[in-house]
Image (tube, grey):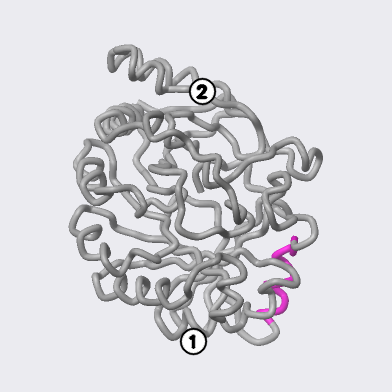
Amino acid sequence: MQLVDPFNRPIEYLRLSVTDRCDLRCGYCMPKGFRDFEEPSHWLNFDEIERVIAAFGRLGVTRIRLTGGEPLVRKDLPVLAGRLAALPGIGDLSLSTNATRLAKHAVTLKNAGISRINVSLDSLRPERFRDITQGKLEKVLNGLMAARDAGFYPIKINMVVMAGVNDDEVEDMVDFCIEHDFTLRFIETMPMGETGLSASRHYIDLKHIRERLARRFELLPGVMPGGGPARYVRVAGTELRIGFITPISQHFCETCNRVRLSVDGTLYMCLGQNDRFELRPLLRDGASDAELEDAIRHAITLKPERHEFRDKPEQIVRFMSMTGG
């Protein structure tokens, strides 16, 4: 069986938010002082999450990424990961994390069945990192090294490039990833309303970053496995792959293969549109597996053709920590 949206795009990838809490406060995701968290009683419990992911697996979704907020804030996350990894049809279980708690959990997560991790890292300078995130860089670096020692591969570093904030560190991040055998991905800021840092004020078209890198490095065509939208190059003479995720300058809507499930059971079809479907009421009203699958099929029919970030930048006011990163 296969989920296909109204524009003939197969849906094979689900980003699952397990919490809207986070121990950092990155301005483009969850501004400092934010307190409007979802009530824990509204969170899907592990049994409910397993039912939903099992249904998606039966419908042809093979890739699941655990996100948040910060997923490692959710108690017993490795237990949930083990349950999801064991489900039929789920061939790829990965994790997005800020890595502040990864040193403690890396081995357990690897043993539970998580195969790949993405780590958000926007600066290698401790003071700047603290300005961006309100956190400590040392914790993230310790988590990264623990993940590498635990055998995670690839480890992808996600850097949101922001003009006047961290764009002067692009080359430093390349050198860091070459040194530690990490994959690097640059991401454009997206206009999600006024959620802290202004996307318009700090936006950089990543083609300029690529041109800048090409003046120092020889960039060759490159590919990486995974279900995401990054376009990759390889740095000649190294194993480093650099991905460019360009939701604004070169949107990838025509190949979008994913939906997002928030911690409260809301299925979001697109980050740049308001289309959604709530699964929690079905789960708590005793829906059968067949009814749950029918609801998911219906939800996919609501997926829009494309976002409208350029045309209507104020259309969406959304905290990524609530929607799922």
Residue 201 vs residue 235: left or right? right
- Residue at image position (35%, 71%) is 143
Q: Residue 303 in magenta?
A: no
Q: How many marks?
A: 2
Q: Which residues are magenta?
A: 203-214
| Secondary structure character of the magenta stretch overall | helix
Location of residue 318 (image quadrant) = top right
Q: Quadrant of the N terminus?
A: top left
Residue 71 vs 50, above or below: the answer is below
Q: Residue 212 in magenta?
A: yes
Q: Amino acid at mark 1?
A: Gly
**Percent coordinates x, y for residue 125 in the rendering:** 56, 81
Residue 194 vs residue 261: left or right? right
Circle 2 sits in a helix, a strand or a loop, which is it?
strand
**Percent coordinates x, y for residue 12 in the rendering:** 42, 38
Residue nearer the viewer, 17 or 247: 17
Are there few (<14), some (14-19), or many (20+) residues within 10 Å of tag 1?
few
CB under 8 Å between discs 2 and 1: no
Residue 151 vs 41, above or below: the answer is below
- In front: label 2 or label 1: 2
Residue 164 vs residue 126: left or right? right
- Residue at image position (28%, 17%) is 289
Location of residue 111 (image quadrant) = bottom left
Q: Which mark is residue 100?
A: none
Residue 278 vs 114, above or below: the answer is above
Does residue 223 appear in this view?
yes
- Residue at image position (61%, 67%) is 132
Residue that badge 2 annotates: 277
How far apart, in angstroms, are the residues tagged by discs 2 and 1?
47 Å
**Percent coordinates x, y for residue 252 in the rendering:** 63, 47
Residue that badge 1 annotates: 237
